[in-house]
Amino acid sequence: MLKEEVEKDIKTYKSLSALANSDGGKLLIKTLRKDIKSDIDTICSLVNEDEMKLRVAIMSLKKNIALLQTLTRSKKNLELALEALEQVDE
């Protein structure tokens, strides 16, 4: 079962890595970085404002960071999954 899970992860990381390295993926990463900066600016401007608006801005920031990390860490995650697969095969 573990081997199949690792192989599934490898397939996912390969797809994410291919996306991140494509022209569209590079544009997406660039846009996410801009969105994160905008989210931070929004949060800073809302510190003394409505708590609900602040929470929404923080959730947006968390979402954008998670998406960015998914794309930018895909190559490293793929390498780690391939190493794990080698260990499972032994």
Image (cartoon, rainbow, N blue to C red):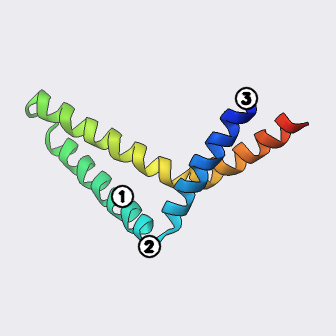
Kind of residue at badge 3:
Leu
Q: Eyeballing the image, is 49 above or below 38?
A: above
Which residue is at the front of the view, 85 or 56?
85
The reply to whether callout 3 and callout 2 are in contact (CB within 8 Å) is no
Q: Eyeballing the image, is 4 above or below 64?
A: above
Q: CA distance from mark 3 to mark 2?
A: 34 Å
**Closer to us: mark 1 or mark 3?**
3
Q: Secondary structure at mark 2?
A: helix
Q: Residue at x 44, y 73 (%)?
A: 23
Q: Residue 54's image quarter? A: top left
Q: Which residue is mark 3?
A: 2
Kind of residue at badge 2:
Asp
Q: Which residue is mark 1?
A: 33
Q: Residues within 10 Å of mark 2 (few under 14, many from 20)?
A: few
Q: Residue at x 28, y 55 (%)?
A: 35
**Closer to us: mark 1 or mark 2?**
2
Q: Secondary structure at mark 3?
A: helix
Kind of residue at badge 1:
Arg
Residue 64 position in % (x across, y down): 34, 47
